[in-house]
Image (spheres, rainbow, N blue to C red):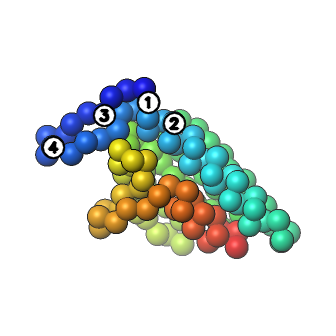
Amino acid sequence: METMTAQSQGEKRIGEEHARELWVSLASLLRSYTAAYGLNGDTQAAVELSEGKILVRCGERWLSLGREGDAVQTRTHLGEMSRMRWNEEGELETEAGGRVPMDLQAEEWSRELVG
C-alpha cells in the first residue's frame, strides 16, 4: 500500500492505491445497502463501478459519484452536488469540514435512493 503524501499545507492525504481500495469498498457498500433497502419493495437499484465513476440507479432516482485521487464528487437526480475527500482514517470529509464514516454515508445515500 502506498504511503500517505503530505500536502503543502501539512495535511496528510491518502495515496492512490489506498483511495482505489476505498473506492471499491464504497461501491460494495452501496450494493449491499441498496439491496437491503429493496428487500421490502418492488424496486431494485443497479450499481455500476468503473475506475473513476460509480453510478447508482433506482427507477427515476440516481446518484453519480466521480473519483479523482482522494476526492469524491457527487451529483444526484435532484441536481445536488457536493465534494468530499477521504482522510487517512478512511472517513469522508465534507467541504464544510464535517467527517462521516464511509459506511454511514453509503447507508444514507442508499436510503435516499431506495427507501
What element does badge 2 sit on?
Answer: helix
Check disc 2 and report the residue beneath it.
21
Q: Where does residue 99 sit, x and y in percent of width and height?
A: 37, 62
- What distance separates the C-alpha of mark 1 from that of mark 3? 10 Å
Q: Which is nearer the eye, 71 or 103? A: 103
Q: Could you say which quadrant of the image residue 17 lies in?
A: top left
**Circle 2: is it few (<14), some (14-19), or many (20+) Cα within 10 Å?**
few
Point 33% across, 28% down: residue: 3
- What distance separates the C-alpha of mark 2 from that of mark 3? 14 Å
Check disc 3 and report the residue beneath it.
4
Point 74% across, 66% down: residue: 37
On the rendered structure, is 60 left or right of 23?
Answer: right
Check disc 1 and report the residue beneath it.
17
Question: Which of disc 4 and disc 2 is earlier in sequence?
Answer: 4
Check disc 4 and report the residue beneath it.
10
What element does badge 4 sit on?
Answer: loop
Question: Which of disc 3 and disc 1 is earlier in sequence?
Answer: 3
- What distance separates the C-alpha of mark 3 from that of mark 4? 12 Å
Q: Are marks 1 and 2 in contact (CB under 8 Å)?
A: yes
What element does badge 3 sit on?
Answer: loop
User: Looking at the picture, which amino acid does disc 3 mark?
Assistant: Met
- What distance separates the C-alpha of mark 1 from that of mark 2? 6 Å
Above or below, 41 against 72 in this view is below
